Image (cartoon, rainbow, N blue to C red):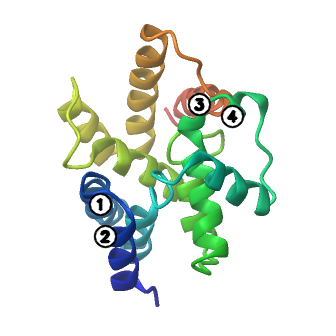
């Protein structure tokens, strides 16, 4: 159904060796998490492969892809190039690769910031990126354990980590991340 081997070849040719390795680690983790949480494994693998497809593209090319796809960059996003690749990546897989699967598109679209009302698939891609084999940061073992047990618990832990890290470096926090945090806390409160 998906052109998985073609996508692997494409990222190997277009991304740096570091980014290629990371993307394959995320793909493997996405497939592993999909199996644990009853989500389509092949679809998760493809989204993992392609999640950073535009990360190393020049900013002006990413902005062009974003705008051609009808996305509007907020003032915050215009001044924070770190989030370009999630929007340009979603546009690229949709418009260049012809992928129409909304799960893959939105999984890529929100894999950096998260958002309120995330789907299980979006959470899975976000967390696969956060917990892939190539990652190393304090409490990673706790993050992986929580993610294995519950995508929502993994989201809460990862969002707390992200927010603390952003604040400690005096960087700005994307509004989607804050909304994602609030949504996650409320959703867990209702479920518990």
Vertical comparison of 111 with 68: above or below: above
Q: Measure how far apart labels 1 and 4 are at the Cα level.
A: 25 Å
The mark nearer the N terminus, 3 or 4, is: 4
Q: Which residue lies under the disc numbered 3?
A: 177
Q: Nearer the viewer, mark 2 or mark 3?
A: 2
Occupied quadrant, residue 69:
bottom right
Question: Is the residue marked by circle 1 packed among few (<14), some (14-19), or many (20+) residues within 10 Å?
Answer: many
Q: Position of residue 16 (x, y in %)?
A: 31, 57
Q: Which residue lies under the disc numbered 2?
A: 12
Q: Nearer the viewer, mark 3 or mark 4?
A: 4
Q: Measure how far apart labels 1 and 3 are at the Cα level.
A: 26 Å
Q: Secondary structure at mark 4?
A: helix
Question: Is the residue marked by circle 2 packed among few (<14), some (14-19), or many (20+) residues within 10 Å?
Answer: some
Q: Which residue lies under the disc numbered 4?
A: 77
Q: Measure how far apart labels 2 and 4 are at the Cα level.
A: 28 Å
Give the side of residue 188 with respect to residue 147, left or right: right
Which residue is situated farthest in the bottom direction here? Answer: 1
Vertical comparison of 131 with 104: above or below: above
Query: Of residues 184 and 188, which is closer to you in this image?
Result: 184
The mark nearer the N terminus, 1 or 4, is: 1
Q: Measure how far apart labels 2 and 3 are at the Cα level.
A: 30 Å
Q: Nearer the viewer, mark 1 or mark 3?
A: 1
Q: Position of residue 114 (x, y in %)?
A: 56, 40
Q: Which mark is residue 20?
A: 1
Q: Position of residue 186 (x, y in %)?
A: 60, 28
Q: Nearer the viewer, mark 2 or mark 4?
A: 2
Q: Residue at x 51, y 54 (%)?
A: 57
Q: Position of residue 66 (x, y in %)?
A: 71, 55
Label 1 close to label 2 by CB (< 8 Å): yes
Question: Is the residue marked by circle 4 packed among few (<14), some (14-19), or many (20+) residues within 10 Å?
Answer: some
Query: Of residues 62 and 140, which is closer to you in this image?
Result: 62
Give the side of residue 67 with respect to residue 93, left or right: right
């Amino acid at each position: 159904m998906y052109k998985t081997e073609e996508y692997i070849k494409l990222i190997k040719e277009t991304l740096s060796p570091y980014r290629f390795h990371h993307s394959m680690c995320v793909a493997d983790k996405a497939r592993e998490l999909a199996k644990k949480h009853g989500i389509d494994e092949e679809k998760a693998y493809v989204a993992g492969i392609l999640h950073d497809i535009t990360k190393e593209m020049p900013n002006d090319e990413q902005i062009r892809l974003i705008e051609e796809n009808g996305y509007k960059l907020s003032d915050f996003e215009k001044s924070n190039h770190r989030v370009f690749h999630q929007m340009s990546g979603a546009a690229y897989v949709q418009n260049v690769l012809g992928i129409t699967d909304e799960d893959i598109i939105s999984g890529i679209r929100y894999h950096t910031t998260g958002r309120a009302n995330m789907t299980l698939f979006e959470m899975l891609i976000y967390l696969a990126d956060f917990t892939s084999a190539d990652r190393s940061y304090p409490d990673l073992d706790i993050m992986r354990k929580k993610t294995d047990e519950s995508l929502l618990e993994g989201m809460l832990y990862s969002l707390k980590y992200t927010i603390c890290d952003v604040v400690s470096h005096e960087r700005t926090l994307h509004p989607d991340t804050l909304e994602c945090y609030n949504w996650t806390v409320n959703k867990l409160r209702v479920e518990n």
